[in-house]
Image (tube, coloured by chain):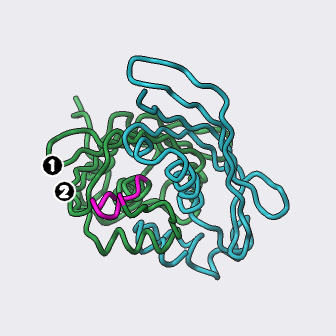
Amino acid sequence: MLLYAEASGDFNPIHVNKEFAEKSQFGRNIAHGMMVAATISESMSLTFGKSWHHSGKVKIRFRSPAYPGDTITTSGQIQKMVLSEEGTEVRCSVLVTNQAGETIISGSSSVIISN
Amino acid sequence: MASKKTDISSYIPDGKHSGSINYGELEVGTVVSQQSYILDKKSVQIYISAVKDTSVQPETSASNIAPPMSIAALSLRGVVNDLKIPGGTLHIGQELSFLKPVRVGMHLECVAILSSNSVRGEYRFMVVDLNVKDDLNDHVMKGKSTIMLPVDISVQ
């Protein structure tokens, strides 16, 4: 998380300061939401390649925090495919859960694949 | 008649990017942050290491295309720093549209504008619109960040 703080410039003490986090509602440090969300982009990029860079969209809610040591699982499911002049828009639901099956992030994403 | 505040610096007592911000005073339309960055190779490598992104394919690394979310992280950097987001702030929602691949080494212009500022219960909710343009003045990313902070730490 320190590395992500360095990469993002987000040194919010909830992520990087143990003493601050222990006094917070979470009782310990939590991961940056965008660090966890990066796994969604990674999955979409692995699945759809360059199309994700050109036309990727994501809309997510951070439902619960992820903690250091958590094992997260990122999944996506195609919900709809829409043909247009630009190509085929693939609409997906996306989900990130922790080892207990709790939802960390939920939302949707889409990408246009050239016909 | 009071002049309309359109820049975050006008909400900081000394007019500089130091001191505290009264988040309740921030008006919709305020430019929260406007920053220029060079998306350098080292920064991208740190980002990839931090998120352990395995999607950087040989074809993209050969053309030095940065992970799209690294652009999002960069655009949020200005928001975090210029809005002086206090410690108890939570990022609760994010929308992103990636419009064009960004090569490493590209100069990027990131602008963040407050699009909503409201209070519900004990929390303040702020929505910030993100816009990132490249050297060619093309939009490469647009987004919308929703953050939540306790009302009682809005004024410091």
Name the amino acid, label 2: His
Q: Looking at the image, how many numbered discs can be counted on the residues? A: 2
Q: Nearer the viewer, residue B31 or A88?
A: A88
- Along the line of sight, which residue is nearer the eye, B149 or A85? A85
Q: Is residue B68 left or right of residue A98?
A: left
Report the side of A76 relative to B16 (left or right).
Answer: right
Q: Amino acid at mark 1?
A: Asp
Report the disc number at residue B9.
none
Residue B132 placement: quadrant = top left
Give x and y (percent) for residue B95. 50, 40
**Chain B rendering hue:** green
What is the C-alpha distance between the residues marked 2 and 1?
A: 6 Å
Magenta span includes A75: no
Farthest left residue in view? B136
Determine contact: label 2, label 1, CB under 8 Å: yes
Which residue range is magenta in the image? B59-68
Q: Chain of mark 2?
A: B
Colour of chain A in the image: cyan
Identify the subunit bearing mark 1.
B
Picture layout, residue A115 above or below residue B127:
above
- Queried whether the magenta region covers residue B62, the answer comes back as yes
Q: Name the residue tied to disc 1.
A: B135
Q: Earlier in the sequence, mark 2 or mark 1?
A: 2
Label 2 belongs to which residue? B107
**Picture quarter with the N terminus of chain B:** top left
Looking at the picture, does residue A93 appear above or below residue B104?
above
Can residue B48 be seen from the camera position used here? yes
